[in-house]
Image (cartoon, rainbow, N blue to C red):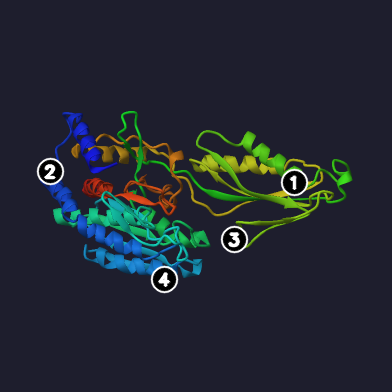
């Protein structure tokens, strides 16, 4: 969306502003003006971050990004700690802490320094044309990180940061979490237990409307993401004996299990994908679990079959019920075959709680003050899993406070530059209001 269209949307929304909407205070006007005044500074920081490769497995690259960000937070009065995670195969995390007024609400801001683009990717540099900028992580999530910095600078200029209790937690492995996950996310979970509200700065979702003007959506929920592996073994033999005493073979059994998964497990807000399958006289996963080496002949009953996929749910209860259904399907009798179904560590769900809805209401209070339309709650199926889900069981949360973009996770990743300013203003006002509340 170009600048003219954005201005038109703002004018339309302002004319529809309810009479009861509070006008911005002098402090809030200072915050919005500061975001605008520092646009060039914010973009320069974004360019520096994007031009430093920080693929999830690039330990040195993520440390370099954290080193760039450390003085930015220290200049705002934060105490910065680096939490090394090389024992998990990843660089580590940045934790920046700002102590504020005693008894004031404690805010946790979540983002990440890593991207999906490793050093061997041809997509490595920042490039801007007008209101659009491209580059690895320019939106996901380096655009979100600079939105945090811009909002905090605005709060500092307006004097609202001084009494704010804020922790900023930037993971270095959001796109590909380290192993064991319990270690990789222990510090983030602990930060969630300390907080009264969690704000996640991954991308803003915009959905097109019938009038052609996109609608900014509020994210109060994210679904889980768990990978599973189904391993079937069966009696082998000459193909002439299939369906007899030797049974049906591993491939038939696997096919029946997968068909039952499709027929019996899906329900609203739940998806169950099969992404990899193979079988034959022999079948085995490779070390990175992304390929299956299978061999066999048409006259041999298949002895092994494998499938991998993912399960996404909206609540812990829905996840547990789906796993139980899948295990029950696998445990059924299949002629001549037995199977095991295993689940790996994954991203838990962020359920759409009343507390999360209340946070969105407060964000919409900010929107009213800024002359912007209210943000409806986004269908959780329209965004993937994220780090905020690790704290969702302990604290109210709101996701999608980063900039709008397109082409994430591809060499076409593009950030809408004006949305950085918009999101920084929303965040600065929201955080200032939340920080002034008592626990």
Image depth: mark 4 or mark 2 in front: 4
Residue 25 circle label: 2
Check if mark 4's residue and mark 3's residue have beta carbons within 8 Å.
Answer: no
Horizontal and vertical percent position of residue 313: 51, 41
What's the distance in space between the residues labelled 1 and 4, CA to CA?
A: 44 Å
Q: If you read the primary sequence from the N terminus, does the residue marked by circle 2 or circle 3 appear first?
A: 2
Label 4 element class: helix
Residue found 35% across the figure and 35% down from its top:
208
Residue 288 circle label: 3
Q: If you read the primary sequence from the N terminus, does the residue marked by circle 2 or circle 1 appear first?
A: 2
Image depth: mark 2 or mark 1 in front: 1
Q: Which residue is mark 1?
A: 251
Crowd around label 1: few <14 · some 14–19 · many ≥20 (10 Å): many
Query: Is 186 left or right of 231, judged from the image as shown?
Result: left
Whether residue 5 can be seen here = yes
Q: Which residue is mark 4?
A: 60
Extreme residue in the front direction: 129
Query: Is 358 left or right of 340, judged from the image as shown?
Result: left
Q: If you read the primary sequence from the N terminus, does the residue marked by circle 4 or circle 2 appear first?
A: 2
Crowd around label 3: few <14 · some 14–19 · many ≥20 (10 Å): few
What's the distance in space between the residues labelled 4 and 2, CA to CA?
A: 44 Å
Horizontal and vertical percent position of residue 348: 49, 48
Residue found 26% across the figure and 55% down from its top:
165
């Amino acid at each position: 969306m170009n600048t003219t269209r954005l201005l038109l949307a703002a004018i339309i929304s302002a004319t529809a502003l309810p009479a009861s909407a509070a006008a911005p205070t002098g402090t809030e006007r200072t915050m919005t003006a500061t975001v605008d005044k520092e646009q060039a500074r914010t973009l320069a920081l974004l360019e520096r971050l994007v031009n430093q490769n920080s693929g999830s497995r690039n330990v040195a690259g993520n440390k370099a990004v954290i080193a760039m960000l450390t003085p930015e937070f220290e200049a705002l009065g934060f105490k910065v700690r680096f939490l090394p995670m090389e024992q998990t195969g990843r660089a580590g995390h940045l934790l920046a802490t700002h102590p504020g007024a005693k008894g004031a609400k404690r805010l946790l801001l979540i983002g990440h320094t890593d991207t999906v683009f490793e050093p061997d990717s041809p997509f490595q540099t920042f490039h801007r044309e007008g209101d659009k900028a491209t580059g690895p992580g320019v939106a996901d999530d380096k655009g979100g990180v600079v939105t945090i910095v811009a909002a905090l600078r605005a709060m500092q200029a307006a004097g609202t940061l001084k009494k704010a209790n804020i922790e900023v937690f930037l993971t270095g492995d959001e796109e590909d979490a380290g192993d064991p996950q319990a270690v990789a996310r222990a510090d983030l979970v602990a930060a969630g237990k300390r907080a009264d509200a969690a704000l996640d700065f991954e991308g803003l979702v915009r959905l097109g409307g019938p009038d052609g003007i996109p609608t900014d959506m509020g994210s109060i929920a994210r679904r889980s993401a768990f990978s599973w592996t189904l391993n079937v073994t069966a009696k082998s033999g000459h193909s002439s004996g299939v369906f007899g005493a030797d049974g049906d073979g591993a491939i038939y059994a696997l096919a029946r299990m997968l068909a039952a998964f499709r027929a019996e497990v899906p329900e609203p807000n739940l998806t169950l994908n099969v992404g990899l399958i193979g079988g034959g006289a022999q079948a085995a996963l490779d070390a990175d679990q992304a390929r299956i080496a299978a061999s066999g002949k048409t006259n041999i009953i298949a002895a092994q079959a494998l499938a991998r996929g993912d399960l996404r749910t909206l609540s812990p209860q829905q996840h547990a019920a789906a796993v139980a259904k899948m295990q029950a399907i696998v445990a059924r009798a299949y002629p001549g075959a037995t199977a095991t179904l295993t689940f790996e560590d994954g991203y838990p769900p962020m359920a759409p709680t009343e507390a999360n809805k209340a946070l969105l209401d407060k964000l919409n209070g900010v929107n009213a003050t800024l002359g912007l339309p209210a943000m409806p709650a986004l269908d959780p199926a329209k965004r993937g899993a994220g780090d905020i889900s690790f704290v969702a069981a302990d604290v109210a949360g709101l996701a999608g406070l980063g900039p709008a973009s397109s082409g994430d996770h591809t060499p076409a990743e593009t950030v809408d530059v004006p949305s950085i300013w918009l999101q920084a203003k929303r965040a600065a006002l929201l955080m200032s209001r939340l920080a002034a509340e008592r626990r």
